[in-house]
Image (cartoon, rainbow, N blue to C red):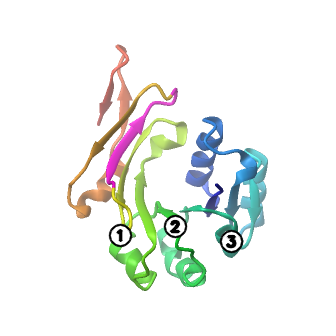
Amino acid sequence: MKLGFIGCGVMANAMMGGIIKNGLFKPEDIWGADPMEAGRQKTKEKNGINVTGDNLEVLANCDIVFFAIKPQYYASMIEEIKDHVREDQLFISIGAGRTLDYLAEAFDHKPIKIVRVMPNTPAQIGLGMAATCRSTCIRECSKRFRDSDDRISVTASDRAPLRRHDIVTIMSIEKSRSGEYHVL
């Protein structure tokens, strides 16, 4: 199984680093695409992954693909890749404001597997929360958070309206002196 990222910015690099650190994927099994040579080089040096300037190369090589680009670039990225997606691929979108309805329409309502994830900034240091919701091709919807030592992992079903999904980006997690975690 290969993991890909379209976009190699701060959040993508934070996720790559955590994935590699926790042994979920080896660097050689991860691909990242970025239009900027400097971004590709920094990602290669930091995480040791395969890098390219071609989004379609990531699609061709990966089973799971993160859309880790700014929301304003989604339309052009999807237009470029939508005729090349495979039925067996899973796509994970972290674009704020890019709803499942938006993504379904942009992909011409093809039956593709998309999970929308809203990570918040503490995820950059390995301590954060992310709300997820799925396209109709995927069954589970959950909220998950874990500490950086991976000692805590909580998953709970969430049936909140999708219109409240983006609020997770302003949530934070605080660890008290007693070692308890609190969602703020």
- Locate residue 137, reporting x and y percent: 38, 68
Q: Which residues are magenta?
A: 140-149
Q: Relative to 34, is 154 above or below?
A: above
Task: Find the distance from the CA under tag 2 to the CA under tag 1.
Answer: 14 Å
N-terminal label among 2 and 1: 2
Give the residue at x 50% y 65%: 91
- Label 3's element? helix
The residue singled out by tag 3 in the image is 60
Mark 2, other Cα within 10 Å: few <14 / some 14–19 / many ≥20: few
Q: Which mark is on residue 108? A: none
Q: Quadrant of the C terminus?
A: top left
N-terminal label among 3 and 1: 3
Task: Find the distance from the CA under tag 3 to the CA under tag 2.
Answer: 22 Å
N-terminal label among 3 and 2: 3
Q: Relative to 102, is 145 above or below?
A: above
How many tags in the picture? 3
The residue singled out by tag 1 in the image is 99
- Label 2's element? loop
Between residues 77 and 91, which one lies in front from this camera angle?
91
- Locate residue 12, reporting x and y percent: 59, 54
**Residue 156's image quarter?**
top left
Give the residue at x 49% y 29%: 150
The residue singled out by tag 2 in the image is 70
Front label number (2 vs 1) = 1
